[in-house]
Image (tube, grey):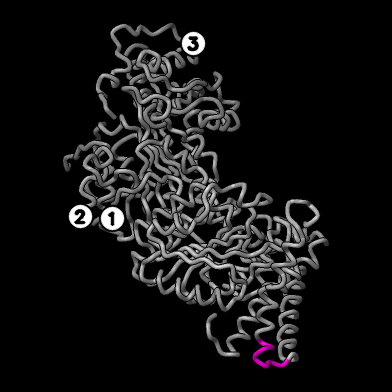
Amino acid sequence: MAKVSTKRALEFYKKLYLLRAAEEGIQRYYFDDEMKTPMHMSMGGEAIAVGVISALKKRDQVFGTYRSHAIYLAKTEETNKFFAELYGKATGEAKGKAGSMHLASPSRGFLGTSAVVATTIPVAVGAAFANKRKKNKKVVTVFFGDGAVDEGVFWESLNLAGLWKLPVIFIYEDNGLAIHTPTSKRQSYKSIEKIVSQFNFKVFKSDTTNVLDIYKIGEEAVKTARKNKPCFVHLRYYRYLEHVGVSQDFKAGYRSEKEFKKWYKKDPILLMKKELLKRGMNTSVIEKVEKSINRKIENSITLAQKAPFAPVRETFTDIFV
Amino acid sequence: MKKERFITYEEALNEALHQEMTRDSRVFVFGLDVADHKRIFGTTKGLVEKFGKERCFSTPLSEDALSGFALGAAVNNLRPVQIHIRVDFMLLAMNQIVNMIAAYRYGSGGKLKVPLVIRGIIGRGWGQGFQHSKSLQSFFAHVPGLKVVMPTTPHDAKGLLTSAMRDENPVIMLEHRWLYWQTGAVPKATFTIPIGKSNVLRKGNDITVVATSWMNVEALHAADILKKKKRVNVEIIDPRTLSPLDDGPIIQSVKKTGHCIVADYDWMNCGFSAEVAARVSEKCHSKLRSPVQRVAFPETHCPTTRPLESVFYPNARDIVKAVEKALKLKPVDLSGEEFYSHEKKFKGPF
């Protein structure tokens, strides 16, 4: 676990809480049917986004997937454009053209996501190549799920990054499920770490859901990648909700609620809250922080609801420069 | 008057790369074997020596990832030129080209730009067969967000490649292998040909032929025969850019001649020729004196063996026949005319 001050620990908690509360906000309003965008929720995996992104510098760059609410919020810490985008409004980051599956915030270094599995991995490798060429010391981090390593382009990208020694970090967010099919039914090999380490990558693996543990791994990976040694970080977590949608789906039969309960004991938000209490922080201080974040989210949702849709002409713009 | 300089299409492409890489250090060239001893039929000659292996390098055989790689480099403000020695290999990269590259700017709400060039070479003859001969311009031109250019002359090859490298958007450039040995007048100094501007390749008043890539060579041949034997003046329009298509000169020409033949170097079914035919029908309906005809590939694959391959590819004779039909001419005497002569020129192995 990374040693951080209590003040810093509270900052981590704020970020984790923001991610969780934002998605709970989505859940509260989703059935009004105003957010017409397929939601792939990050819930359960917040510590990965917060831990890794906290280890990056602001100028470092990030790519994600269609499951990137956590990444967006951890990298930008803003919720107005986020909710506006989910509501498909003109005030959204991409004026409603992107929605939940294509979130990005180029001005804050979040360079893109994709709804086709694994397809931002080579883009991150190319971005890292450009950074290395420019000698600007920026690190590129790309997040992807365990379904992505079933794709050929993952292995092609791994080879390119290892071959050309690029400043890139692959974050393998492993929830053990590609849609509804478990890893055991998809992968013939036992240890991806053994394979990846032969591609000239430094490899990390952990089952932790503690954000401070992940932050520590992240710091090590960032330090390594900045010296042009690519890193592969395998982090396991549990997807709390259905593949797409905002509800639990334990009754569907492909997994059991027991499993969820086991993982929920080490829920990343609860773990961090316990850590703060253990350090003697007053409950009222934590509650105050939570309330302030809740207000911020509720305010962003209201703004998004009231905002206009983009004008008709926007359908046709942004094709070419 | 200053004497014009004549160089080949291949030399024109090479010169464009040299000049633009000198002018803009963000430009780099990569792909399978771009830095080997053959240098993409000479078009990447001298680049690695002059600009170093950071800016001109051969790659693993990973077309899919390398297209995403180009996108990432472009988003971070480099100017990649990716080369595929056969267009057929670009199919391995279709996800990146269509789902990612074409849509990336749109998906970012206009915040990102994607200045990249993909060069694809169209093979033909000496047994290239059905996986080394595709052109696929109709596929690419179908997708919003991709610019598609197909230069025919050495002059256009240099000017359009230079424009492509300066464009802020993704440009796919499809180059016919047989055009590489064509020579033409090309200024030595750097210059651009605007993307999205059609060209009247030959002036005429009797009939309009819209031709793409190699079909322009066939159209010129047909025009010579028709002029000589029937005093028919064919106007040839080379769109050069297929998307975004500048249909103005095509419409203007058809309004003048009243007849239109589209000779496209791709499959006819659902192809670029259908797009041109549709636009001509929509915009020149009352001026058309004969139905628009199409000369393009039949709905089959390109065979390897020469006798069948010659059946597959349309040529000047097919254009002459179409002109006869449109203008209700008696059959042109084609004895003594040689067709498919380029097959004899092109030898293997590749």
Image quarter in which the N terminus of chain B is found: top left
> Where is mark 1, residue-wise?
B21
Q: In the rendered structure, which disc, 2 or 1, sits on the residue that comes first in sequence?
A: 1
Labels 1, 3: front one: 1
Q: Residue at x 40, y 49 (%)?
A: B117
Note whether A69 is above or below B19 in the view shown. Answer: below
| Residue A302, placed above or below residue B307 | below
Tag 1 subunit: B
What whole-number distance in Å separates the C-alpha atoms at marks 2 and 3? 58 Å
- Sequence-wise, the earlier of marks 1 and 3 is 1
Res. A277 image quadrant: bottom right
User: Which residue is label 2 attached to?
Assistant: B50
Does any portion of residue B55 appear in the rendered image? yes
Label 1 CA crowd tier, 10 Å (few <14, some 14–19, many 20+): many
Range covered by the magenta-colored residues: A276-282
Residue B12, magenta (yes or no): no
Quarter containing the C terminus of chain B: top left
Pointers 2 and 1 in contact (CB under 8 A)?
Answer: yes
Q: Toward the viewer: A233 or B118? A: A233
Label 2–label 3 contact, CB within 8 A: no
Residue B270 sits in quarter: top right
Inspect the image, locate mark 2, and give the three-letter code of the amino acid beneath it. Answer: Lys
Q: Residue at x 42, y 58 (%)?
A: A126
The three-letter amino acid code for the residue at tag 3 is Lys
Q: Are marks 2 and 1 on the same chain?
A: yes
The local secondary structure at tag 2 comes to helix
